[in-house]
Image (cartoon, rainbow, N blue to C red):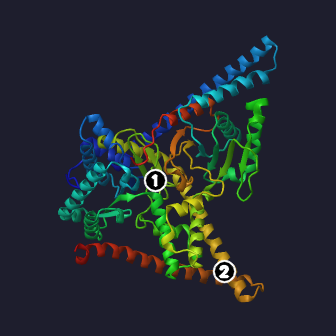
């Protein structure tokens, strides 16, 4: 009997996997076909009108993105991009960051649970700069970017979007370090244990930049877990899952933002 | 309505349970039982009726979990943030809790039969005193049971819990039980309200909300999280099966992520020990270089003494917690 149950179980999971693969395949096809159509249209248009492609496509797209951002009922202040996939695509993440900038999101965090993005911080930043040029075209100078690295002071620029690359070290380890710091103060008799509460710990974990907690986390990939993403800071964060960050489209991104805009927060009430 | 529901699954449910059990099963499941008020609104009944039905659903869900071989369940019953609700609703919820914990005392025999241990996690000092006493009675009388565990988070938020754990460690430092350098992820785990439970494998939130709302943030960092759109009082056996199926699909990837995390944790502990030993040796040897053999023995003996300090501290902390409940039940407290 046990053998039969196991057989049925295996069959069930095979079917589920098949369903997932089919969904991914269909998504891929639609995206590719959509992409091809766009490219074809873009090639035909400037030929007929005699303009160069760059200027013609960059501006309306940017204007549309800004309008999309304004049309939303509420926009997250801080978006986390959580990649729960084996392979990391730098261009796709860079696109997402640039879209966030374009619709007017102030803080973007990028995370994966093995710290791959942290280790390749500069590669990601380069890619973001490149995509910024490409997607926002000549207007890109209007968008200033700030990259926060651990230890280095951010540039004193007038900034619109702050991008931070996070790793598991920013999660539980940072809480443990804050705890150690408080205990050291107690050891030196500078504090007593009675002084310690949520506010004290929160101000230690908030760092100097005063970045707000993420309002929205876009989770990419098949794993349904936060995988150690900032445990302290995700108290009220909305989680929206997308199947993959690979070849993610602006429409996918926008529909996630729309879903977020329709959510109501009651905070215990 | 009692805490433990007797009864068996139907044939179809039993077959499904057996099929599911052929795969990896979660050992510990946590629930955010959301949607009682929306349910009441939908059914045009009193809000309090929604909460009562929500409790009944909990009793039913516990039975399903037992039938599925899940022996530990943690539920979010009342958040510290919930004190912000209307006075009337908070009062109603406190009354419901009082009634249910009193009821629990009548069911001693049944609880003993099933070996149910009930723990209440949260800052109980925020609650009315008579409720505190009822809770203490329930906790103390089921303390020795060890077949299945029900953790009720009451007057709880995860941030409060973490801050409280840090406070306990600072207390340990004040008492001279541990050093500040002994503070580690593993020690923080031991100071949380959930120290006697393994981390949940699966977290389920009902009613379509996609937030954690300050629930077990630390403990679920590598758990499978399932958001379901059904309202809690309407939750069914099949909803639970669906969540478990999703857990099974995630099982491999999450185990791998847990492994990566565990390795990182071990590395951190080793690094911390290394730097403590280096400091000690420098202090002792006046900066003279130390041969690796000597360093290795020093490292081992340091790790052993750290472990000893930590164990002593955890023992003291446990005693402090037990005293809290015992004190609530002592005759002087009643008077």
Residue positioned most to the top: A48
Quadrant of the rendered image containing residue B156: bottom left
User: Which residue is labeled 2 in the image?
Assistant: B277
List x then y, in percent, for residue B194: 42, 64
A91 left or right of B260? right
- Alpha-carbon neighbours of circle 2 within 10 Å: few (<14), some, or many (≥20)? many
Mark 1 or 2: the one toward you: 1
Disc ID at residue B214? 1
Chain-order first, disc 1 or disc 2 = 1
Which chain is home to disc 1? B
Quadrant of the rendered image containing residue B182: bottom right
| Residue at 64% from the left image edge and 37% from the top image edge | A100
List x then y, in percent, for residue A156: 76, 50
Q: What secondary structure is found at the residue carrying circle 1?
A: loop
Residue B252 visible from this viewpoint: yes
Disc ID at residue B187? none
B118 left or right of A94? left
Along the line of sight, the residue nearer the viewer: B218 or A236: A236
Q: What secondary structure is found at the residue carrying circle 2?
A: helix
Give me the C-alpha separation between circle 1 and circle 2.
38 Å
Along the line of sight, the residue nearer the viewer: B134 or A30: B134
Along the line of sight, the residue nearer the viewer: A97 or A228: A97
């Amino acid at each position: 009997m046990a053998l039969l149950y196991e057989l049925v179980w295996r069959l069930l999971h095979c079917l589920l996997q098949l369903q997932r693969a089919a969904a991914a395949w269909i998504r891929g096809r639609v995206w590719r076909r959509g992409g091809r159509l766009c490219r074809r249209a873009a090639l035909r248009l400037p030929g007929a009108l005699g303009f160069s492609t760059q200027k013609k496509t960059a501006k309306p797209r940017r204007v549309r993105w800004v309008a999309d951002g304004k049309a939303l009922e509420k926009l997250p202040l801080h978006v986390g991009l959580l990649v729960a996939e084996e392979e990391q695509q730098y261009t796709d993440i860079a696109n997402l960051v640039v879209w966030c900038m374009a619709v007017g999101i102030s803080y973007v965090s990028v995370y994966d649970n093995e710290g791959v993005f942290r280790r390749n911080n500069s590669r990601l930043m380069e890619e973001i700069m490149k995509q910024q040029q490409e997607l926002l075209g000549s207007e890109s100078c209007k968008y200033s970017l700030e990259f926060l690295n651990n230890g280095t002071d951010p540039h004193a620029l007038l900034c619109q979007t702050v991008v931070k690359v996070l790793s598991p070290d920013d999660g539980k380890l940072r809480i443990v370090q804050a705890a150690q710091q408080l205990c050291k103060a107690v050891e030196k008799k500078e504090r007593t244990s009675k002084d310690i509460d949520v506010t004290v710990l929160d101000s230690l974990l908030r760092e100097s930049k005063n970045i707000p907690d993420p309002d929205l986390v876009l989770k990419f990939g098949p794993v349904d877990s936060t995988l150690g993403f900032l445990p302290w800071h995700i108290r009220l964060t909305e989680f929206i899952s997308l199947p993959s960050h690979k070849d993610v489209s602006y429409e996918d991104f926008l529909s996630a933002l729309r879903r977020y805009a329709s959510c109501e927060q009651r905070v215990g009430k | 309505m009692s805490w433990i529901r007797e009864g068996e699954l139907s044939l179809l449910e039993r077959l499904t349970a057996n099929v599911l059990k052929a795969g990896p099963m979660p050992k510990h499941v946590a629930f955010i039982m959301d949607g009682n008020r929306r349910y009441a609104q939908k059914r045009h009944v009193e809000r309090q009726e929604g909460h009562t039905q929500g409790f009944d659903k909990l009793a039913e869900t516990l039975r399903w979990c037992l039938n599925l071989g899940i022996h530990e369940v943690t539920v979010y019953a009342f958040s510290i943030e919930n004190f912000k609700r209307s006075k009337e609703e908070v009062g109603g919820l406190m009354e419901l809790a009082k009634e249910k914990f009193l009821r629990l005392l009548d069911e001693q025999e049944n609880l003993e039969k099933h070996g149910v241990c009930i723990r209440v996690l949260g800052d109980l000092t925020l609650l009315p005193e008579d409720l505190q006493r009822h809770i203490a009675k329930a906790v103390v009388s089921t303390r020795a049971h060890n077949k299945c565990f029900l953790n009720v988070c009451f007057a709880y938020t995860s941030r409060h819990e973490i801050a409280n754990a840090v406070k306990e460690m600072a207390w340990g430092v004040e008492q001279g039980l541990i050093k500040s350098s002994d503070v580690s992820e593993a020690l923080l785990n031991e100071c949380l309200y959930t120290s006697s439970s393994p981390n949940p494998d699966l977290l389920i939130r009902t009613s379509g909300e996609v937030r954690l709302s300050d629930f077990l943030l630390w403990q679920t960092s590598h758990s499978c999280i399932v958001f379901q759109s059904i309202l809690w009082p309407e939750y069914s056996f099949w909803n639970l099966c669906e969540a478990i199926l999703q857990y099974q699909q995630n099982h491999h990837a999450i185990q791998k992520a847990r492994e990566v995390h565990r390795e990182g944790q071990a590395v951190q502990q080793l690094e911390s020990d290394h730097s403590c030993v280096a400091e000690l040796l420098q202090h002792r040897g006046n900066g003279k270089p130390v041969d690796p053999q000597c360093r290795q023995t020093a490292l081992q003996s340091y790790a052993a003494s750290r472990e000893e300090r930590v164990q002593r501290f955890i023992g003291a902390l446990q005693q402090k917690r037990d005293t809290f409940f015992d004190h609530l039940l002592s005759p002087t407290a009643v008077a």
